[in-house]
Image (cartoon, grey):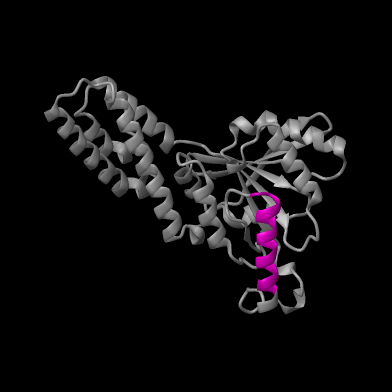
Amino acid sequence: MNNESSKIMPLQQLLSQLPADATEKIYRQLSSIISYEPCIGLMGKSGTGKSSLCNTLFSPPPARVDAISGCTRTVQRYRVTHGTHTLTLVDFPGIGETPELDSLYRSLYQAWSGRLDLIVWVLKADERAWNEDIRCYRDLLRSGAEPERFLFVLSQADKIEPCREWDGLNHRPSQQQQQNLQAKTRLAETLFATVHPVIAVSAAEHYNLHHWVEALILALPVHSGSAVSRHLHPELRTDTVRETARDGFVRVTGEIFDEAVNTLKTSGILVHYLHQLRHRLLTVARAVWHLLF
């Protein structure tokens, strides 16, 4: 028995009390979630600090895999490997050079959208206008992109004016900078009509990263939150991050169980038994989550 199988054994033992076909279905789907390899897209202009942000978030830092050609531009792929598990980051070419290239950019996104769990769109906090970003984003929405799959973040918060007031000792903005950052986040939420909150961060100063990572886990599809959390830098796996990811895994486990037993012909006694078994399964899933992820 390999290490992964031994970790899921407590769940297997409970599932063995169900008919074989239901047991197999639940086990197969749970194994798929536990071994899931998430894929996150990175969008925005060149120079917004996408690489710096990713290097700070994940442990070990992402390693470049390859560049995938798309006509005259390329998509860069990076991987974060943790044991036998992998997280893929897909860095799209910078937008805003010309309308023609932005059209190509839209085609690249459409080619990848089905494989992405979430798209992180990076905006520079000190940029005066995001006209190109807005135009490209609205173009993607008109092409069928779903707004809930985008998480916007303001990068390089330490460069917001008045930048000389940044508190380098405590790695935080001055009162005036904080007010300006709050105004910029509200502006971004309005202009992009965001589904998820926009948060200002600084990778160089490690500012607000905990807060943003918590938003990242919440924005991810429920089946991929735990898989992403295992790749985060240990300092960023806060209690809130772990609890959010764990709750998501438990919820998905319950949904998988419900779907598998829904076809069983049940009497009143069996319904009560299945309800008890479900409760025990979710209790065990919560207890062993830290071993699985």
Q: Residue at x 63, y 52 (%)?
A: 54
Q: Main secondary structure of the magenta part?
A: helix
Q: Which residues are magenta?
A: 177-193
Where does the image place residue 1, in percent across and percent down from the top left?
A: 31, 33
* Residue located at (60% from left, 30% from top): 114
Question: Which image quarter: residue 112?
Answer: top right
Could you say where residue 233 lies in the image, as x and y percent from the top left?
A: 53, 56
Q: Residue at x 63, y 74 (%)?
A: 172
Residue 209 appears in which quarter of the rendering?
bottom right
Residue 179 in percent (x, y) is at: 67, 72
Does the stretch in magenta take in 180? yes
Locate residue 255, reporting x and y percent: 35, 35
Residue 216, compared with residue 181, is above or below; it is above
Residue 229 visible? The answer is yes
Query: Is 262 situated above or below 37?
Result: above
Farthest residue toward the left? 269
